[in-house]
Image: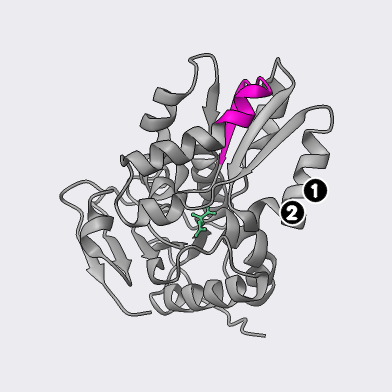
Amino acid sequence: MHKTPINSTRQNPIGIFDSGIGGTSIWKEIHRLLPYENTIYLADSLNAPYGNKNECSITKLSIKNTELLLKKNCKLIVVACNTATTSAISYLRQNYAIPFIGIEPAIKPAALHTKTKAIGILATKGTLSSALFSKTAARFANDVKIIEQVGEGIVELIENGELYSKTMETLLRSYLAPMLAQHIDYLVLGCTHYPYLLPVLTKLLPKHIQIIDSGAAVARQTKAVLNSNHLLNLSDKDPHLEFYTNKNTHIMASFLDAELKVNALQF
Ligand code: DGL
């Protein structure tokens, strides 16, 4: 319905959006793999968390973010949010004429490599209750026990800049306890905010438990899709890297390298 033919060039930016700061963990993987690509990142922190909203609201927010990135001439959009991917990516793919990359929890590699046949997954309510998650779990982890845990409250703490707070540690301890009781050997981080928990999680978990996320896989997929659409930027000039948030620029900047500027924008 909204499909409009677009004439992207290789220099057009990659658009990336998330419900907030979390997707910058994905931006970092993309920038590492594709250092010459121009990028525009949108943090919809004003509407975070998406995880407890219904599918219709998440789709509406994803449309709003997409329209803004399209106005800024993005050639491809990375939905750097597991929750928005599960709720909205089919709609976006059907209605807009550019490629979309989504993100899903890395259940497949965890299920493939687990020795204890028990894996933990920490994600939002929206992701864990989605049809896409059930389908992926049934397909790749049929013979494995999945201990699911909704990360209630984690995104809010990260968005408030309380990553290393006592409250965060207490919350995580309570979420990990049932997983440890079931002897998981893999913990899947099913929300793009959660890679920022790694320092705390490695402190709280026994060493033999592997913690995995999908960031690097998303970056590889972004490169492959750009390549197959003849949209990889072949230049070796310093890229334009733009970051926008509709909430707190300082908190967001604290998750990025000091030379990267975060702009305030109402959207
Ligand atoms: N970062 C998001 C994800 O990957 C969403 C978190 C939220 O807003 O609830 O699911």
Of 215 and 114, nearer the camera is: 114
Residue at 69% of width from left, 34% of height from top? 147
Can you give x and y, in whole percent of width and height, for residue 44 in the image? 41, 68
Q: Would you say residue 59 sits in the magenta stretch? A: no
In the image, residue 101 sits, relative to residue 223, either above or below, namely below
Can you give x and y, in whole percent of width and height, for residue 169 in the image? 40, 36
Q: Amino acid at mark 2?
A: Leu
Disc ID at residue 254: none
In the image, residue 129 sits, relative to residue 182, either above or below, namely below
Disc ID at residue 132: 2
- Pointer 1 with pointer 2, Cβ within 8 A: yes
Q: Which residue is mark 1?
A: 135
SS class of the residue under badge 2?
A: helix
Region rendered in magenta: 177-189
Residue at 77% of width from left, 29% of height from top? 145
Q: Is residue 97 visible?
A: no
Residue at 43% of width from left, 66% of height from top? 9
In the image, residue 15 sits, relative to residue 142, either above or below, namely below
Residue at 59% of width from left, 70% of height from top? 58
Give the quadrant of the C terminus: bottom left
For this view, does 19 lie left or right of residue 178? left
The number of discs equals 2
Give the quadrant of the N terminus: bottom right
Q: Residue furthest bottom?
A: 1
Q: Is residue 59 visible?
A: yes
